[in-house]
Amino acid sequence: MQQTEPSNIVGNEVKIPYMTILGVLIIIVLFSLLWRPLNPDRTIYIPLTPQVQTTVLENERLPAIVGNATLEIVDDRTSQEQQVSESLDQPKPEDDIVKDEIDEVISQEDNTVQYMVGRGDTLYGIMMQYGVNRSDIYLLTKQYKQLANLRIGQQISWVTDAEHNLKTFNWVISNNNVRIYERAGDKFTERTETREGIWQPFSINGVIDSNFVVDARNLGLTSNEIATITKALQWQFDFRRLQKGDKFSVLLSREMFDNKHENSQLLAVRIKNGSKDYYAILAEDGHYYDMNGGSLSQSFLRYPLEKQARVSSPFNPRRLHPVTRKIAPHNGVDFAVSRGTPVLSVGEGEVVIAKYSGSAGNFIAIRHGRQYTTKYMHLDKILVKAGQQVKKGDKIGLSGNTGRSTGPHLHYELHIDGKPVNPLTANLPVSDGLTGKSKTTFLEQFKTIKPKLAFASESTETAQTNQ
């Protein structure tokens, strides 16, 4: 007995540590299986209280007692319902780009889009870049094959509902022939409007007294006409910098109905800013050029990166939330890039916002001319300041994972006329001028137009010289 006692004691002492380690391992495994991280957006902290009285009420979220502390249990569905109506990538409301009078005449606040058909355009491509429901485009073009015959310079317009479903589509085939397509259940109906208006030329001369928008309106120019002028010359100078005494001359063709007009076309415009003259002349291809047939546009980069990257989330204004199945629009494109990847400005412009802004994280917005705006979100670092002028290809920041983001990426948006469009398919401005026969024809055309754009003072001087 005395010889075996020590061995039993030793055996018991050896077994105790193994059992303890096994128990700890079991606890760790169970903890890792059952534990999940708390979402800060779903956690509400309540001060410690010695006693908590609870009452059971229908549809109320009641605090749960844990020791001498309380936690409010939040229903996941309620939290989701509050967020699915807006895009997940949004700067703070106070960080919206402030609009001035020129922006107001260019931007369309409703769901109406107007578009002039250009070289290489197709109806499908035009409407897809504005996020129109793909099935509606297919239905319309399948029903009416003639819509494949859009011509350069023709005007089209359409109206969508809040979910980007197509409601109406207008096609101005000629001055007196407009076809209107309207949604009726699961198909579109067509009707034709024959107009009997008379197209007449109009020449308007003005002098800047307060600002271009006010002075142009005082002379009878409509908002659409002012918008066309500012778009045509948006890359040449900033309309906000026109000074008192600067002059402008506009040549229009208007469709008149009993001394009233509904439609017009800008043929040419000349603006004298200080000692410099700026011209925009409409050519046969539906685009505007300077007096020498040179381009009035600046080219854009298609991608805001040095190298093309994988798209982790595409542009989709009708994206469905995976849980609630409600629409949560994605107004840009997400590029899967690692943290610290250089982000480039896609075009020349002015930085209007460069700051941290809510779920957008580190956020940059750049205005390019008057018609285009680009936005860059979730940046790791901002390398520019508000008010700074940048050129195409300039490094403006480094990609990151700031704001409401599940991983390193770049969220990039392109807005045209105040509306988000698909940056990977949008028709970007080009900087090609006229050449060959097209240029020769244009220069001959300009010879007849130039005298009609003369200012009143110049006309007087010419008349006195001829005498």
Image: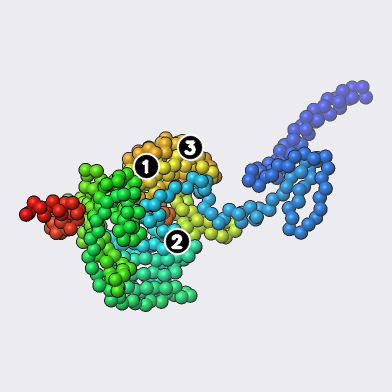
Q: Disc 2 marks which amino acid?
A: Asp
- The disc placed on residue 92 is none
- The disc placed on residue 380 is 3
> Mark 2 sits on what residue?
110
Q: Disc 3 marks which amino acid?
A: Asp
Label 1 crowd bin: few (<14), some (14–19), many (20+), radius 10 Å: some
Mark toward the start of the polypeptide (2 vs 1): 2
Residue at image point 77% right, 39% down: 48
Q: Which secondary structure lies at badge 1?
A: strand
Looking at the picture, how far across and down is residue 399, in whole percent? 45, 39
Looking at the picture, how far across and down is residue 29, in whole percent? 70, 40
Residue at image point 23% right, 63% down: 202
> Mark 1 sits on what residue?
350
Mark toward the start of the polypeptide (3 vs 1): 1
Q: CA distance from mark 3 to mark 1?
A: 21 Å
Mark toward the start of the polypeptide (2 vs 3): 2
Q: Which secondary structure lies at badge 3?
A: strand
Residue 460 shown left or right of residue 370 in the figure: left
Looking at the picture, how far across and down is residue 52, in whole percent? 82, 45
Q: CA distance from mark 2 to mark 1?
A: 26 Å
Label 3 crowd bin: few (<14), some (14–19), many (20+), radius 10 Å: many
The answer to whether 275 is drawn above or below residue 55 in the figure is above
Residue at image point 30% right, 62% down: 117
